[in-house]
Image (cartoon, helix red, strand yellow):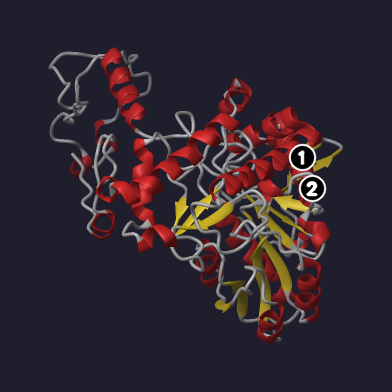
Amino acid sequence: MPVRLIFEESEAGRRGYTLPELDVPYKKDLIPERHLRKGDAPLPEVSEGAVLRHFVNLSAQNHHVDKGFYPLGSCTMKYNPKINEQTARLEGFSRLHPFQPSATAQGALRLMRELSRALCEITGMPAVTLQPAAGAHGELTALLMIRGYHTHQGNPRKKVIIPDSAHGTNPASIVTAGYSVAQIRSDSSGLVDLPALAAALDEDTAAFMITNPNTLGIFECGIERIAEIVHKAGALLYMDGANLNALMGISRPGDMGFDAVHLNLHKTFSTPHGGGGPGSGPVAVNEKLEPFLPMPVIDIKEEGYIFDYERPLSIGRVGSYYGNFAILARAYTYILMMGALGLTKASVCAILNANYLRTKLEGVYELPLGKHTLHEVVFSGSRQAKRGVRTKEIAKRLLDFGFHAPTVYFPLIVPEALMIEPTETETRETLDAFAEALIAIDREITENPEMVRSAPHKTPVRQLDEAGANRKLKPRHF
């Protein structure tokens, strides 16, 4: 039976709530007349059970990580353990107020301090800020610290270099931080072209911004040489940490020569992801950038954990309060539950799963770059496109098999890209079923291509005009 709108479920007089008596003084003139509602809000009148069933039915029509495989490349959509939710909902955490005195929130401050120390150990950096609310926010925060460092040195510099395989948020963050973007090409192996990088570096370069492993899932094996030539030019080396799930316990950005790295707690550390938030993008830095961390910084004194505002070189606040605390609690829980060996095993299994899929699909879908990848693998649908079916249509058809599509058309340097990241939390049976679905779709392209071109067939809605929806927004309110 089709799910009706909640307003269509409404019947006059039905209630799903009971409000207590108003316990604060009400002054009629407190709100200006022009802001007062002239009639009752046209809200649906439904029972509590009807509300619950309505939204449960809606959620069942959506694809989410608790429902099925979500192999978004470079997004690390791993399972979110429910123990994380339990700790984040502890009353002592969930009922905190950001303005209460730090003396009354010692447990929360201790959690943030110990999480910071854990992230420092994982990244090989001496200091970290937990304030950024997402990965791109972390990018901006790191770039503002880099600007602060160079300004303190007497020259803020003008540009930041990125490879042509960079995440789309990288150039946006660079421009927002006040720099211009300089892009260099990748070499024939999908790695940074060292001569091109050396040629682009000059006295105006503030930083080289790179993901490692890169967006092809390939480890930049020349990273120490990259760090050497970047630092020789007086620039800093910044790592987009979107792919840290391939490195935990195996290799550390600080040991590679990076000056800063942002981490996505909503990717690598199993906290909720998507829908616009809440996310968290802490930034870990070395000694050069530590004085420029956003304030306040959590410190420990004789009286206990405190917020330290005495930081003259700080770039200031980058967000409200001290970060998305409930997300920090979830990530802290994950790290404690996994332990050092568990985090290492997570990375090893993520790499194993990605290479398992690579070997299952390599003969069917083209693998243009990176014969040996880490946690993700980027195929090309070029063979299928030559037979009349584009990557986007393959992605839509996967929904009929019960799988969300991998990232498509990124990175831009791979035509008809299919970017697959299985993470460590998926079983071999799930990986086999996903590979078999992609192989079956390839077979359909030969036998019945219209079946793929017109997909999906089993979802609540069919093909949508996605470009039109983005360009012609029609928000409504009642």
The residue to which callout 2 is attached is 250
Give percent across and percent down for residue 190: 62, 68
Q: Is residue 229 above or below residue 266?
A: below
Identity of the residue furthest to the right in this view: 302
Is residue 407 rendered to the left or right of residue 122? left
Is residue 253 rendered to the left or right of residue 99? right
CA neighbours of label 2 inside 10 A, class few (<14), some (14 to 19), many (20+): few
For image coordinates 30% across by 18% down, the residue present is 53
Q: Secondary structure at mark 1?
A: helix
Distance Cα–Cα, label 2 vs label 1: 6 Å
The residue to which callout 1 is attached is 344
Q: Answer yes or no: do the residues labelled 2 and 1 have beta carbons within 8 Å?
A: yes
Give percent across and percent down for residue 6: 21, 26
- The residue under label 1 is which amino acid type? Thr
Q: Nearer the viewer, residue 52 or 193?
A: 193
Q: Nearer the viewer, residue 317 or 384?
A: 384
Q: Give the tally of numbered discs.
A: 2
CA neighbours of label 1 inside 10 A, class few (<14), some (14 to 19), many (20+): some
Q: Quadrant of residue 185?
A: bottom right
For image coordinates 61% across by 27% down, the residue present is 84
Question: Going from the N terminus, do you reach mark 2 or mark 1 first?
Answer: 2
For image coordinates 26% across by 16% down, the residue present is 50
Is residue 238 rendered to the left or right of residue 216? right
Q: Secondary structure at mark 2?
A: loop
